[in-house]
Amino acid sequence: MKKKLFLTAMLAVSACMTLCAQRSDEEEGRRALEKSAAEYDSVPKWEGRKAELRSNIITALGIDRFPKTEIRTVSSNRRTYKGYRVENMALEILPGVWVSGSLYMPARYKGKIPFMLSPHGHFYNNEDNSIPDERGRYRPDQQLRCATLARMGVAVFSYDMWAWGESALAFDPKDHRTDLAIIMQTWQSVRILDYFCAQEWVDLTRVGATGASGGGSQVMIIAAIDDRVTLSAPVVMVSAHFNGGCPCESGRPVHILPDGTRTNNVEFCAAFAPKPLLIVSDGEDWTKNVPEVEFPYLQKMYGLYGAEDNVENVHLASEGHDYGLSKRLAVYDFVRRRWSLDASRVYKDGRYDESATVVEPAVEMYVFGEERKLPEGTIMGSAALRAMIASFDRTVEK
């Protein structure tokens, strides 16, 4: 019986992953936004839709059943550079389940400061994707943006995708291509907010999230479901016709409502209204139509609140899919203006200067050191994790 239930569940997951990751064509995406704007043409109507979207995401992921246990932390290798410092830190988000990251802080600060979630995307060396220094949060571009924001006065937590980085010490990297990834990555973001929003030095009115590609998908989801996020900047990901090709973005039916109708990442972004939102797009991927399709829709939905100026788009038509310098500059400027930051330490001669950042090798950022020894009691393997998650469901027969 158990074997039959397991096989049924796996078939359902496989079908869901195929269905959820499916692209629509560009015209279909355009029509979906037109229909949304026409149907939800007032604040009360859109607030109802926002509540529906949020409930569906949470229910589809099943994270409403997850316990919020005490968050233990492990810290290591604090180092100080010009204008900022970095500390390796892991948080226990479920009993025996850890998320590892790098906490970037201003070298000096007074009172409360802003806090930024910084998930990474699926970026790596295309010729050899096993090179640690060019994967995930260890990449130079990820370090540059986090350190520069820290020099601007923002605390930034840069963290591994599930089954990437140090998470892959406990879970097979192949399991990142399962529905567990979107579940765990969303839960990671929730628990990171739980921990840092409880710190007395965090300004709760200035809590943001930014990431590119798969990191942008994480940003859109957490911003749609968690009111603590007050500023959002998804990069090269917002599209009406593509919700992401990895199960960590669409491996659960977060884009399919209970009645079978579909939503998309643009509605997720609109659900953030009227709070400040920056969409960074480019001309070589699925975000190429943002200035003509997605952005006008977002302006219309923000306009319901009289907040058209709170949504912005920086479109880089000649660029491609990355979180490169031009994208980072757009985010720096947006964050500076929206959070009234003193950027004098990084803004020189009319431009943002990243040159003070020390780009570290991956080994410097390992929470658990070169020996890679995980804490006692760490959950090992996705089967053990699934078993624990199943135990959270009161409907599961004991």
Image (cartoon, helix red, strand yellow):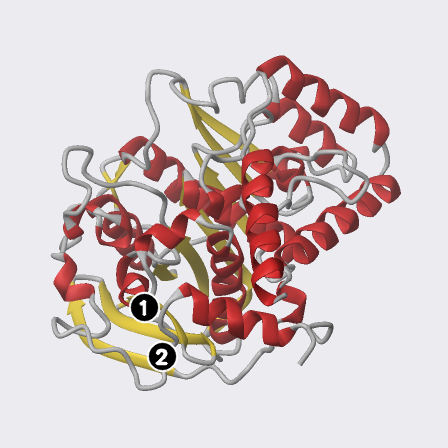
Mark 1 or mark 2: which comes first in sequence?
A: 1
Query: Which picture quadrant has residue 361?
Result: bottom left
Taking the image as shown, residue 3 lies to the left or right of residue 33, namely left
**Residue 113, percent across and down?**
44, 67
Whether residue 273 is visible: yes
Task: Give the numbered dot on residue 146.
Answer: none
Residue furthest front in the image = 1
- Location of residue 109 with respect to 304 vertically, above or below: below
Which residue is found at the position 63% from the left and 75% from the top? 392
What is the three-letter code of the residue carrying label 1? Answer: Ala
- Location of residue 345 with respect to 295 vertically, above or below: below
Residue under circle 2? 378
Taking the image as shown, residue 267 lies to the left or right of residue 347, namely right
Q: CA distance from mark 1 to mark 2?
A: 8 Å
- Secondary structure beneath label 1: loop
**Residue 286, percent across and down?**
47, 23
Which residue is found at the position 13% from the left and 57% from the top? 360
**Residue 193, percent across and down?**
51, 67
- Location of residue 221 with respect to 171 vertically, above or below: above
Marks 1 and 2 in Cβ contact (< 8 Å): yes
User: Along the line of sight, which residue is nearer the eye, 75 or 69?
Assistant: 69
User: Along the line of sight, which residue is nearer the eye, 341 or 313?
Assistant: 313
Taking the image as shown, residue 229 lies to the left or right of residue 199, namely right
Quarter that holds the C terminus: bottom right
Quarter that holds the N terminus: bottom right
Query: Which picture quadrant has residue 205?
Result: bottom right
Which residue is found at the position 22% from the left and 36% from the top? 349
What is the three-letter code of the residue carrying label 2? Answer: Thr
Residue under circle 1? 170
Whether residue 337 is visible: no
Disc 1 crowd rating (10 Å Cα; few below 14, some 14-19, many 20+) is some
- Secondary structure beneath label 2: loop
